[in-house]
Amino acid sequence: MGVEKNHDMSSSLRDLSVEEYVPPAYIVEAERHVSNIERLNAACARETELAMDGLVDELERMVSGLSSSVSDTDAVEAKQKVEGMVKDTVSRVSKVTKALHSGVAKYGKHVDGDARSVDLAVVQKIFGVTVAPDGTGCLPREVMKELIVEHFYVTRDFECGDCLAEEAGVPNAEEIKQPYLELLRIENELKRHSLEDALAWVAVHEQQLQGGVGRRNRLGFLLHRLSFLDVLEREGRLKAIEYGKRHLREFYFGHATGLCALMGGMLFYGGESSSMDIDGQRAESHMIKKRYKPVYGDQRETMWEEAVEEFRKQYSRVMGKPLESPLLVSVAAGSAVLPTLLKYAKVAEKTKSAGTFAQTSHELPVELPLPDEFYFHSTFACPVSKESNTPSDPPQMLPCGHCLNKSSIYRIAKSATRRFKCPYCPQETVMTECKDLHLF
């Protein structure tokens, strides 16, 4: 019965339009404010341009009318006249500017006041969220200040971040900023094809950079590969081989293909010409071209770009810093799903189910599709129940290798000691032999 209700609610959500949860009068009033602001802005720009042109013309006429020898009395009169003209110009511009600022303020009050009351009460009631009229209540004010300051640092707008930190009184702003300054400095060095600082950072954080099986410090391999090619170009094959023995040997497990292409390509390296003779007589084989041209051909700049991108990812992971602004991601994701949430709030209010959702469930009864860039963790959907895993219903792997949610396994087995057959192969097992899967 509950499933049918959710199904009917989802159908109703698809049928609702924007006008059903945003009053038309509110939209009309907002459009009127916007049109008024556009008109005032055009008038302000036009009046300011005329006033400034008039002032410049008057000043040019005064300068041309002054002789080379000006008495003190004439100079005082000229100064007073100029001050009067500037004052008149400022007054003229201020009148239209004041009207523009008034129009913008009225529009802001309309958005902050009327829009907040459209469905906020219903959303708060359904989802159990308490938000004060001034927008506070979800997070402590000090945390919000730090999030906004960090947003500016993540987006490389350090001047705005410092200004806000000083005015808002964020005591640990310098501590927040330092990792992003270091990231920007090393990233700029890599873009200038300088590897020294990046390699030094990799050496310090070598333990944290070790990945899983087959992913042994990919960043270290990318940087040492570029350094190897640089040594090969400047000092020749023998020095490059010595460099490879010292720094590249450890990357064989996990990067064997790239390492073999790097070493094998030296056979076709152009020597004194410092170029790969891929298209010449020494490398006629299509297989040779396919295997070595990505390393020794004309894709060196792509390799540098790949190293810069990998450094950004690994630096953010090791230092525990976000790759993108958390505030920006939250606002973007919220903006994408807000229409669906408002539609659900409207339907829930009509079906008298408002107030029950927040107390009875930790999952939304409607799908909130988001683009791939908003997914930061692996997820698992049980092939039997078609439901995603939760902390209380983790995925488990059977001895045969097939994976199901724990609740699905229990429904099939009916008992922790009863043997049951895997729904996807003939192998039998018991619940105690199933292992939890940990997704990252």
Image: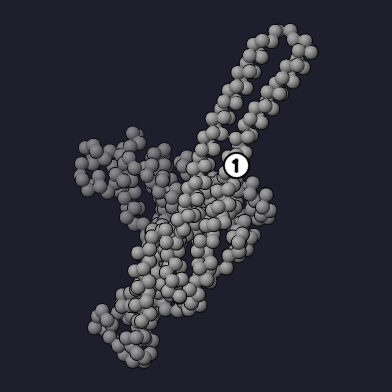
Give how far across and how far down residue 262 sits, in percent: 34, 49
Tell me: residue 170, above or below residue 231.
below
Name the foreground residue: 202 vs 157: 157
Q: Is residue 167 above or below residue 236?
A: below
Mark 1 burial class by Cα count in 10 Å: few <14, some 14-19, many 20+: some
Residue pictured at 60% horizontal, 42% vertical: 101
What residue is drawn where x is 57% and y is 45%?
A: 104
Residue 267 seen anywhere in this rendered image of the structure: no
In this view, 183 is above or below 431: above
Q: Quadrant of residue 60?
A: top right
List the residue tagged with mark 1. 101
On the rendered structure, is 420 left or right of 407?
left
Residue 298 location (% of width, % of height): 32, 40
Residue lying furthest right in this view?
72
Say what amino acid the circle numbered 1 marks: His
Looking at the image, which residue is at 57% across and 44% down?
Answer: 103
Image quarter hosting the C terminus: bottom left
